Image: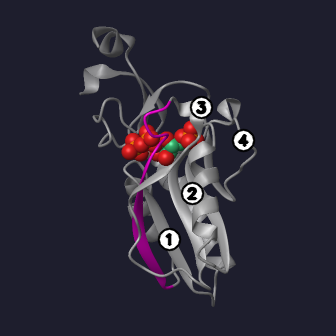
Amino acid sequence: MQRDIEEVLVSRETISEMVRTLGKRISEDYEGQELVLIGVLKGGFVFLADLMREITIPVDMDLISVSSYGAQTRSSGVVRIIKDIDITITNKHVLIVEDIVDTGLTLKHLKELLSTRGPASIKVAAAFDKPSRRKVEIEAEYKGIVIPDKFVIGYGLDYAGKYRNLPDLCTLSPKVYSKA
Ligand code: PRP
């Protein structure tokens, strides 16, 4: 697997520091409130697992799986729920936990969808952000690390289902996708 990596873009140490900082901010901001973390599968589960352990207030958590844009191209912007959350979020403070914000389409639609269920608030925590790719105006309130427009793998992010288990955020060697 190591030889498929072109370069380490964000090291595990930098990621870990970012997660600690966000966890501290979230713990302070939501002190005394009912907070529900909703991890977005599949990519978001690694960040969720790390982030929740840096949060020092009681939290509830669940996972949601959405199909990115149906059978259409990414630009269609339609998000369909594949696996819904089991818990009720009415009157609770919701924090959506994502690995990356790219075009912003997934988040925009997910926020709209969850807001129909009457939460007290909905905000977003994202480990990585590619603002240069944005198609809709949306920002994570808890933003980790801004990255350039490169194809990235690791820390939950995949290429053809693989490499999610890399602890660093890396770029993929072009020889891997030129084989595809
Ligand atoms: C990725 C990522 C976000 C979304 C971001 O998921 O986890 O959910 O894309 O892109 P956007 O801002 O352009 O909408 P992906 O569809 O690759 O699914 P996965 O997490 O299961 O790999």
Q: Which numbered disc, 4 or 3, marks the residue closer to the eye?
A: 3
Of the image marks 2 and 4, the number of the one nearer the N terminus: 2
Give the quarter of the figure containing the N terminus. Answer: top left
The residues bearing labels 3 and 2 have C-alpha atoms spaced at a distance of 15 Å
In the drawing, what numbered circle is on residue 37? 1
Q: Is residue 3 left or right of residue 34?
A: left
94 or 166: nearer the viewer: 94
Amino acid of disc 2: Leu
Q: Indicate if the residue with disc 3 has its beta carbon within 8 Å of ligand 1.
A: no
Q: Which residue is mark 2?
A: 110
- Neighbor class of circle 1 (other Cα within 10 Å; few <14, some 14-19, many 20+) is many
- Kindly identify the residue that appears in the image at 48 percent across and 67 percent down: 38
Of the image marks 1 and 4, the number of the one nearer the N terminus: 1
Circles 1 and 4: CB atoms closer than 8 Å: no
79 or 156: nearer the viewer: 79
Please identify the quarter of the rendering in which residue 177 is found. Answer: top left
Amino acid of disc 1: Leu
Circles 1 and 2: CB atoms closer than 8 Å: no
Q: Which residue is mark 3?
A: 75
Give the quarter of the figure containing the C terminus. Answer: top left
- Neighbor class of circle 4 (other Cα within 10 Å; few <14, some 14-19, many 20+) is few
Q: How is the image coloured?
A: one colour
Q: SS at mark 4?
A: loop
Q: Which residues are magenta?
A: 58-72
134 or 79: nearer the viewer: 79
Of the image marks 3 and 2, the number of the one nearer the N terminus: 3
Amino acid of disc 4: Val
Q: SS at mark 3?
A: helix
Of the image marks 3 and 1, the number of the one nearer the N terminus: 1
Of the image marks 1 and 2, the number of the one nearer the N terminus: 1
- Kindly identify the residue that appears in the image at 50 percent across and 71 percent down: 37
Q: How many marks?
A: 4
